Amino acid sequence: MMLIGIELMLNAANLNLVIFSNAESIDGQIFALFVIIVAVCEAAVGMAIILRMYHHYHTSIPDQLSELKEKP
Amino acid sequence: MTLTELSLYIFIVLAACSAMGVLFVRNILYSALFLIICLLCLAGIYILLQAEFLAVTQIMIYAGGILVLLIFGIMLTLKKENKPLEVGSHHLFSGSLVGLGFLFILIYSLRSASLNIKQSHLAQPNNITEIGITIMSDYVIAFELAGILLLITLIGATIMASVSKQG
């Protein structure tokens, strides 16, 4: 769920970059390309972390991982 | 209103509606499917803004790669007493407060910015050649760094996702 939100926000940023650089140059498009590359890396590493987390704790919800939380 | 503007507005409305659907639907698999619709609409907007290469990259990488990876991960971690994983929207008040503040910042900077949209790239049919030349001349260091980042990510994700025998 967090990964989906991150992808949505990165897409919004990309759209802003493309629109506001459309007037003069294509620098915004190239910057958006690099944003897409970094988003791919983030998605791959995040999915690997989630798979390991599911392997350990048998849950994929981050709110349930409260091992380090101070018990009341 | 020309056909281009009409389709641009249709794509914008559809993208906004599917983004709201991503946020407010309960089943996480449906929200991933809404995200596909949103990304395809954004690709359509890129095409209408004369950014064809970015649109094709968006369709291939996002809709073809990242979404398949997301749905793959969702389906691998979904099994929990055979009922679909339900997610809700927490922190609704503070989140909407931050969102509204960001919207006001954006509107303020938009009003102060001098916006002269001229159709400079409309003359040439595509700018893929220009993008390629610019990447390999001005942005070559960033390009190589992106390659190194992809390699590191590949190795790291493979090591983390593979089940190791030692521990």
Image (cartoon, coloured by chain):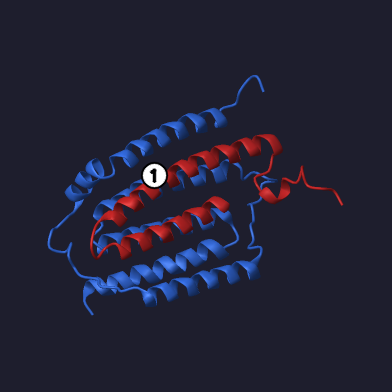
Chain colours: A red, B blue
Residue nearest the viewer, comparing B74 with A14: A14
Residue for badge 1 = A37
Amino acid, disc 1: Ile
Where is residue B140? Give x, y as percent.
28, 40
Residue visible at 43% across and 55% down in the picture:
B36
Q: Along the horizontal axis of the image, is B99 left or right of B111?
A: right
Q: Which chain does the numbered disc 1 sit on?
A: A
As drawn, B146 above or below A23: above
| Residue drawn at (57%, 68%) of the image | B98
The secondary element bearing badge 1 is classed as helix
From this viewpoint, which residue is outermost toward the left? B123
Q: Quadrant of residue B37?
A: bottom left
Judge left or right: residue A54 versus residue A46. right
Q: Is residue B137 above or below residue A22?
A: above
In the rendered image, the residue lying farthest to the right is: A72
Q: Nearer the viewer, residue B3 or A43?
A: A43
Is A1 displayed left or right of B2 in the figure? right
Res. B79 image quadrant: top right
Q: Quadrant of the C terminus of chain B?
A: top right
x 44%, y 47%: residue? A39
Locate residue B29, reporting x and y percent.
Answer: 54, 53
Q: Quadrant of the N terminus of chain B?
A: bottom left
Residue B71 is situated, as x and y percent measured from the top left of the image, at 51, 46
Q: Residues within 10 Å of mark 1 (few under 14, many from 20)?
A: some
Does residue B129 appear to the left or right of B160 in the view shown? left
Let me know if residue A57 appears in the view.
yes
> Looking at the image, can residue B45 be seen?
no
Q: Position of residue B75 (x, y in %)?
A: 56, 44
